Amino acid sequence: MTATRSRRPSFGIGAVRVRPGSSRELEIPITTLVTGAAVSLPVRVIHGRTDGPTVWINAAIHGDEVVGVEVIRQVMSRLSAKTLRGTLIAVPIVNVFGFTSGDRYLPDRRDLNRSFPGSPRGSLASRIAHLMMTEVVDKCSVGIDLHTGSDRRSNLPQIRCDLDDPHTRALAEAFHAPLLYHARLRDGSLRSAARERGSRVLLYEAGEAWRFDDWAIDAGVAGVLRVLHHLDMVDSAPPPPETPPLVTRRSGWVRARTTGILKTDVELGDQVTVGDRLGSLTNSFGRTLRLVRADRSGVVVGLTEAPLVNRGDAIAHIAEIEPVASALAAAAPAASGARDSRDPGDAQAGLAHEGEHDGDPDATTLDEHG
Ligand SMILES: [Zn+2]
C-alpha cells in the first residue's frame, strides 16, 4: 500500500538533509569567538513523513527573553516526525550572544530585531539576521516569533500581527491568545522582512524577560499547537478558551508623574475605566506622593514589575478594546448576536472608533519588538 505513495523529498538546511519522517538537531555556523571556539545557531527540524506546510518557530531574538525557549521545548516534545504533516523548523535561541551573556542586544549593542533582512557582509547582527532569513524564513510560509516584555515589564499574552490581512488574522485567531494586537510592520524587524518574502508571521508577546512565567509559557504552547492544527499539520491541539480574544488597534502607556516607590492596584487583564486608580507612588516613609490613574478605558496589557520608578517611567499599558459586536458584524452580518455573552467592548464602544487610524504615536510607544 505504501509502495504506491511517492516518497517526500528530504529537507535541506545548513549542511544537512533531513529525511522525511525524521527529526534532526543541527548547528549552523555563525562566527568564531576570539578564543577560536565556534559559535553557531542551534536549529531543530521535524520533517514530517507526509506533505504539508513548512513553518518556523523562533525565540530569543532578544537575548533576555527566555519564555519562548521553553515554549519551543514543550511544543517540540509533543510532536512526532512520524505523524506531523509538513515541516517545522525550530530556532529556540536566535540571539545566541545575548542569550549567553544575559543581554537583550548583541555585543555591538545592536537590536537584532532591527537588523533584518541583514546581509552576509554586514554587522554581526546583520549576519545573524541574514542567516535566519536564508536558512529558515525563506523556506517557510508561516512563522511564529516569540517574545516577552523587556526591562522589568510584563505583558499579557498577546499576538501582534497585521489583522488587516485575512490569512494572518485567521492564524492569530487560531492561536487564541487573550489579546490580538494590530501592529504595523516595523522596518528591520523579522516580521517585516519575512512578510516581504511572502511569509505570514505572528509575534507572540507574553510575560517578562528572564523569567519562566508558567501562564505565559502555557498560553504560548497551546497557541502554537492550535496554529499547527489550524494548518492541518497535527491532528489535535488544546481546545481554545470559550471567550474570544480581545482585539485592539490602539493603546498607550501611563507614565509616572513623579519619582517614587510604586504599589500597583491592578493586574494584567484587568478592565479599567478612564480615571480608575492603577496604583500609588509613595516616598520612602510610605507617604503617598501621587496616585496613578488610567488615562483611557480599556484592558491592562502590560505592567511594570519595578518597585522604584522615576518620573516618566512607563507603569501600565492600556489597550482600547474593539467592540466585539462591530467586529462580528463586519465578519458575518447575519450572525451578530449569535456568538458570545461576554461584553468587553460595551464600555468602550464609543472609544474604539476614535483610535482606528494609523500614525498615532501612542500606538507604538514602548512596542519595541516589531
Ligand atoms: Zn523581544
Image: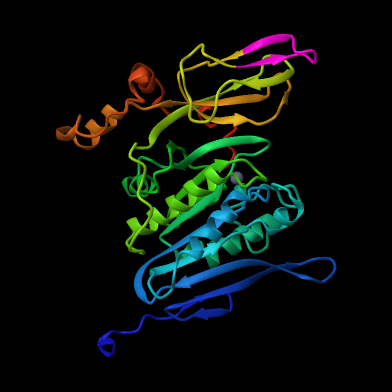
What is the residue that sits farthest to the bottom in this orientation?
Answer: 3
Q: Residue at x 52, y 59 (%)?
A: 74
Tell me where the magenta segment starts and ends, as one range: 279-291
Give left or right: position of 238 versus 95: left
> Is residue 289 on the magenta stretch?
yes
Which image quadrant: the C terminus?
top right
What type of secondary structure mainly makes up the magenta span?
strand
Find ligand 1 in the image and state its quadrant. Answer: top right
Is residue 370 in view?
no
Q: In the image, residue 151 lies at what x, y percent?
A: 68, 37
Is residue 69 in view?
yes
In this rendered view, identify the residue nearer to me: 49 or 219: 219
Q: Residue at x 14, y 34 (%)?
A: 334
Which image quadrant: the N terminus?
bottom left
Q: In the image, residue 73 lies at what x, y percent?
A: 55, 60
Give left or right: position of 256 versus 355: right
In this rendered view, identify the residue nearer to me: 338 or 256: 338
Q: Residue at x 27, y 29 (%)?
A: 341
Question: Which picture quadrant has residue 349?
Answer: top left
